[in-house]
Image (cartoon, grey):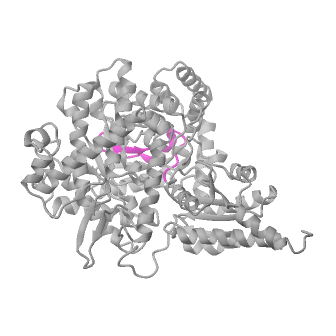
Amino acid sequence: MGVAKYTKDAKGRITDVTLQSGIHVKPFYGPEDLERVGFSYEKDLADPGVYPFTRAIHRQGYRSRAWTTRQYTGFGTSYETNERFKLMISHGQTGLNVAFDLPTQMGYDSDDPMAEGEVGRVGMAVDSLRDFEVAFKDINLAEIGSGLTINAVASIMLAMYQAVAEKYGYDAKVISATPQNDILKEMIGRGAWIFPVEPAVKLIGDTIEYSMTTMPRTNPVSVCGYHIRESGATPAQEIAYAILIANAYIDNVLPRGYDVDEFVGRFSFNFNVFGNIWEQVAKFRAARKLWARNLKEKYGVKKEANMFLRGLFGGGGFGLTKAQPENNIMRGAYYALSAALAGAQTIALCSYDEAYTIPTPHSAVISLRTLQLLMDEIGLRDTVDPLAGSYFIETLTKEMEGKIEEEMANIGKVGGIIPAVATGYIQKLVSRQAYAFEKGIQSGELLKVGVNIHTEGESKDVELHEYTGETAERQIEELKRVRRERDQRETTRTLLDLEKATRAGKNVMPYLVDCCKAYATVGEMTKIFRDIYGEFKEPGLF
Amino acid sequence: MDAVSSTDTVKEAALAAKNIRILIAKPGLDGHDRGAKVVAHALMEAGMEVIYTGLHQTVDQIVSTALQEDVDVIGLSIMSGAHIPIIEKLVKKAREAGIDDKMIVVGGVIPIRDIPRLKELGVRGVFPGGTPFAEIVSVIRENVERGQEEKWA
């Protein structure tokens, strides 16, 4: 949910505000605060588009280009997803964001016993290239970019995307995919992991290397502080862990003989927007600065454009409430305002009904309109970084920077991000914080409108997307047809090649593309990885 | 029990000595475990012994862990919307394994209108997201104690 802690005196006057990252907010700020934190215009701020990019990565900010809107879409079969895509594009959405069902995310075919009851439930089911052919039919893949919300098998889905684009006549060089592809955050917070840490990170390295050479407009990895925050991390931890995770992926690619400048410019980030508005704005500004400094000082990145923190700032799912759900429309608007004030390149909002159901087309359009309204109606494109120079915002940004660095140092003390995830150190820390947060809500120490203040009666019941099993039946029938009609000899050959390449530790991407083109299924490809790599062993809970 | 006057003392001692053991399980492929972990912390703080299965568990795995760990309560955390088919399966498998005396509770994304059906299936506590910890703890404690009393009666 994300609210600060307030201490009040007997008359109800606020005597202290503590932000989630542990920073105390003063009643007012002045020049002496900037002095206290050692603020310097050149070093800490600089003009927009100038290192360290605290203010913005582009000199003209939203004047030259408004942010991209990208609502999360996709449910049921590829046919339904295709219709929803076209609807969102007709309403002016400029990028797609694909949701996959859980069996696909976990690398199981729709007819696998593990997939029972889950096919098409929370996103689109993908078994083979056939499903992508339907989902992306009549969509201009040279113009529209696609976010693919998938991680453990992102390599497979990226290969599938190239395969479908080529099938529809697009050159791999012109298409732009953004697979989420951040497995370390899955191990911390979202749980859709399959393979152990090491091979899982190697697969991400493969996609980065392959994109660099074959699909240069693709953003192979979207590092997600977002889910880490949803799991209970503070805003400072969200940024700290994301930077360290991104570094882990860089460290996997560097030994393959590339210069960091060749690939790091395509990295992107996904951060959360719920919480205290000032803390969010300061967080994003500090994050831009720290990422640029990390690349320049630690990795010796030379090209300035490669130091840009490009990202989707959005969502805010954990901030939404089932109680008085219409309030979520306003919450979303304020969250979007935080993101826009902080110079986000891409914004997506959770829809107001997402706290209790899968968003309807109507609610998805409301979210889109919320963003368009900020952009076209009330002046968010007028000037870059409008809060710059505020005594408060600049002090807070500096303090936030300090907190993020502190959190990074804490992970250094336990041996770095990979051991911190593999041993469950971070998972334990954030789950304890989540518990403390929840207690704060239940005790009323943390305020939440409609939940523990300004409440009214019953909260809205959750509505589940109707799931009849027909979706699964149709999907399984289609899958069987694909297996029947494909050139089985070719499929087997490509799968054997994939197996050999995997065992040999080669980059698996070209082999995956061949498998996809031969209509090998997601389950068949994943099984090869499962057999060779094994599975991640979840560390103990407490 | 063939015992006489000592029954009450034995029962009391048993209740006092025996911490409530609860299995927190995440059935299915969903990996959103914030809720499961938060509730696990609350139950531990209330003095219960919590065993957590980890993610991606099949119903068979959950039943087998419940059997091995000899828990009093099986608590499922389900966010996927598949709570009714999962509970139906769990009840059936628990019966087959001879552990249908275990109390079953469920939390997560559960519509209020599904509660009667879940109760009908034998679920003793349904805790949709946001249920106060105190309520979860007291429902579990009361039911386990009642179960113990029936056993000793």
Height in image: A330 above or below A279? Answer: below
Image coordinates for residue A244, horizontal then vertical, percent: 35, 36
Classify residue A153 as left or right of residue A67. Answer: right
Classify residue A297 as left or right of residue B11. Answer: left
Between B86 and A524, the one nearer to me in the picture: B86
Q: Is residue A130 magenta?
A: yes
Residue A251 found in image quarter = top left
At 71% from the left and 50% from the top, the residue drawn is B65
At 32% from the left and 63% from the top, the residue drawn is A3
Image coordinates for residue A157, horizontal then vertical, percent: 46, 38
Q: Is residue A292 visible?
A: yes
Q: Does the magenta stretch include residue A421?
A: no
Height in image: A288 above or below A84? Answer: above
Image coordinates for residue A104, horizontal then vertical, percent: 53, 44
Between A75 and A319, the one nearer to me in the picture: A319
Q: Which quarter of the figure is the N terminus of chain A placed in?
A: bottom left
Residue B50 found in image quarter = bottom right
Height in image: A162 above or below A437? Answer: above
Q: Can residue A153 be seen in this view?
A: no
Classify residue A356 as left or right of residue A19. Answer: right
Between A77 and B39, the one nearer to me in the picture: B39
Image coordinates for residue A356, horizontal then vertical, percent: 46, 67
Height in image: B4 above or below A440? Answer: below
| Residue found at the far bottom of this picture | A457
Magenta residue span: A123-150
Picture mark count: 0
Residue A20 found in image quarter = bottom left
